[in-house]
Image: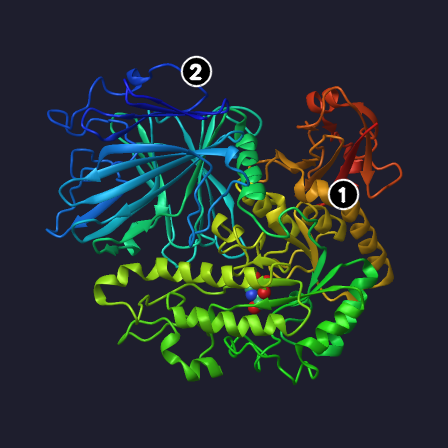
Amino acid sequence: MTIEWRPDDRQFHLHNGMLSMVLRVYEDGTLGGLHFGAPLPTGRSYRHLGPDTFDGFDGRVGDPIPFALPTSGLGDYRVPALVAIGADGSGTISVRYVSHTIAAGKPSLAPLPSTYCETDDEADTLTILLVDDLSGLEVDVRFTLFTDRPVVIRSTTMRATSRELTLRTAMSLSLDLPDADWVMVHLSGTWAREAHVVERSLQPGRVALSSQRGASGAQHNPFLALRRASTDEAAGEAIGCSLVYSGNFLAEAEVDPFGTTRIRIGIEPDTFAWRLAPGESFTTPEAIVAWTDQGLGGLSHAFHDLYRARLTRGAWRDRPRPILLNSWEGTYFDFTADRLVDMARASRDLGVELFVLDDGWFGHRDADDSSLGDWVADRRKLPDGLDGLARRVTELGLGFGLWIEPEMVSPDSDLFRAHPDWAVGTPGRGRTESRQQLVLDMGRPEVVDHLAEAVGAILASAPVSYVKWDMNRNITEPYGLDLPPDRQGEFFHRYILGVYELYRRLTTRFPDILFESCASGGGRFDPGMLAFAPQAWTSDDTDAIERLAIQWGTSLAYPPSAMAAHVSAVPNHQTGRVTPLETRAAVAFFGVFGYELDPTTLDESTRAEIRDQIAFYRRHRTVLQYGRLHRLASPFTDGRRHVAWMSVAADRSTAVVGVYAILNRPSPETHRIRLRGIDPHVEYRVSGWPERSDDPVFRPNLGGRVGADLMANGLTLDLARHDAARLGDYWSRLFVLEAV
Ligand code: DGJ
């Protein structure tokens, strides 16, 4: 058992040798949080880490008492985890310990997505029952600890028993830390510029990241980390929290006047209210909180390993993901079946394994102004229907993939004409269009039923082996027509539950289809989606240089097997930048690799280069998709000319290192890229890819090197002036390490 209960101290100690979390039931029955971080010995009392005694705030209002489930109104003026308004209108609640259970395994949170155990001996779950006598509110606070992962998983269920209540804040996690010497790290951006790493030292006050858009959003990811000032990628203390949720969220850090820190993460409270009639309950999404002393890299590995192995599920969880060619940037809306088959044939000849037909195949969609909702093939473009096209593609020996955007409806569509009330809008306020489309109210069961039927029928009609599920606008004028006025605060959460329900039905009906989530790129790249779709379209920005930043940031929380990355044409459609084909591939290799261009327009030398790229990726696919990613040189560090990262096979026998130059400079400084994660005692053969004779970057680095030397001294990037001048901007080099 990883959970120790000491009745004399009323103390819980969650421990697995990788971290400890210590909780204590104070004298008044409230739940204290005494420690989260480094592993501590068991069999000991840690009550000295909290107040001597705590029997309510009498005489000590505002003191920084460390709580695990802070509520409002009692004297803790920091941000609360739980706010419930009782029938009397009061928001003061006081939930006190009643009992607890410790059980092997981890319960499912369905209909919410959640991490899971394959066998009950993988984890233990502590459930603490707290009750507010006056309102009758019962709360189950759950903590799960895996035996071999440095994470604690939190969720909470609230039940009204005797009286009605309205939940106004229901955080998934609240964590009190005894100091504020932290640098907060988060992933922020916008369309085509997702997941940029932002860092700031904590100061007194609150810093909040949130979404009120109906999706987790490209603006902020539901992920927040704290690191010590001295923590780097490889070493040092770091805490990270992440929310298994795809809707409106809040992630916040607060430093109080005493210099303590509270972090909380959960459903965004300003757009949330949930009425609980007696007998009803509400369960929060789950939050994951990780601790490591192995730097941001170690923190990422904790999330990567958990999300890859115990959040993602289904037939594709552990399978090599296919190399695909997506039609979008090659054709946009302008294609015929014959043109697509020509593209598929040309892709097949390059070594591509899956051909994906993107937007524009249904209704009469020649631009983004119509047909969403009408999931029937456009016979003008596809005279033999979807099945006819899919068969021609699969006969070439390729898989066939399809784009859908099920949550949306175009005002110009049969679906909208038949069911105008299914589109989200507030009566009397109209509906704001975005990309000339409206959002279907996924909170309504009849909408989900219809989509399961319509999308299910199209997927059943043809040999489809991959689906890209897009979502291209956020919600405005939120209102649930089927909800009474006093339940409108439930709209956003019901929306995302409807999305999960549709995912659940389609992934259950089509267990062999590989789903990829997308929201104009990474606008809903979150753990909730990963529970249904094992990979996501990382960004609409396919520019290799921009992708260095986007993929670097995304990898803080998400594994390479989740990050779709494609090579596209130049000038790049998002930035206008021209980068070498080699660099575009060298960046996209460190994810789920593919192409997004018209392969029929390529000359022979380009085709040959792409064939080599695909052969390379196939050879190293397991390492690149499922290996351990180490970030070596950051695109976010000022003045850094080189970016580098590497993936290492689980048995450390092989590694692939990517080194990328952004802007060249004359008389370059000497520079070393120190490697990580390989075996110090093993002799590796270092080769360069693609092979080049007498290359100034490869020259000093190729041949036999022992792992210890590669980690201590690294690869050498000392370029002579004339060599640097010849290389220009945006070059890249790949190094392959193979144990001799
Ligand atoms: C946005 C996606 O991110 C793109 O890849 C593409 O699928 C378009 N939508 C299609 O409308």
Would you place residue 92 above or below residue 479 in this image?
above
Give neighbour class at mark 1: few <14, some 14-19, many 20+ (Cα, 10 Å). some
* Pair 2/1: label in front: 2
Q: Quadrant of residue 696?
A: top right
Q: Amino acid at mark 2?
A: Pro
**Residue to which mark 1 is pinned:** 620
Q: Residue at x 51, y 60 (%)?
A: 503
Q: Are marks 2 and 1 in contact (CB under 8 Å)?
A: no
Give neighbour class at mark 2: few <14, some 14-19, many 20+ (Cα, 10 Å). few
Would you place residue 53 above or below residue 638 in this image?
above
- In depth, the one of 701 and 142 nearer the eye is 142
Would you place residue 489 above or below residue 297 in this image?
below
Residue 689 can be seen, yes or no = yes
- In depth, the one of 322 and 294 nearer the eye is 322
Q: Is residue 297 left or right of residue 666?
A: left
**Residue to which mark 2 is pinned:** 41
Q: Where's residue 119, x and y in %? A: 54, 38
Q: Quadrant of the C terminus?
A: top right
Q: Is residue 633 left or right of residue 705?
A: left
Q: Residue at x 47, y 77 (%)?
A: 410
Q: Quadrant of ligand 1?
A: bottom right
Measure the alpha-carbon separation of dots 2 and 1: 42 Å
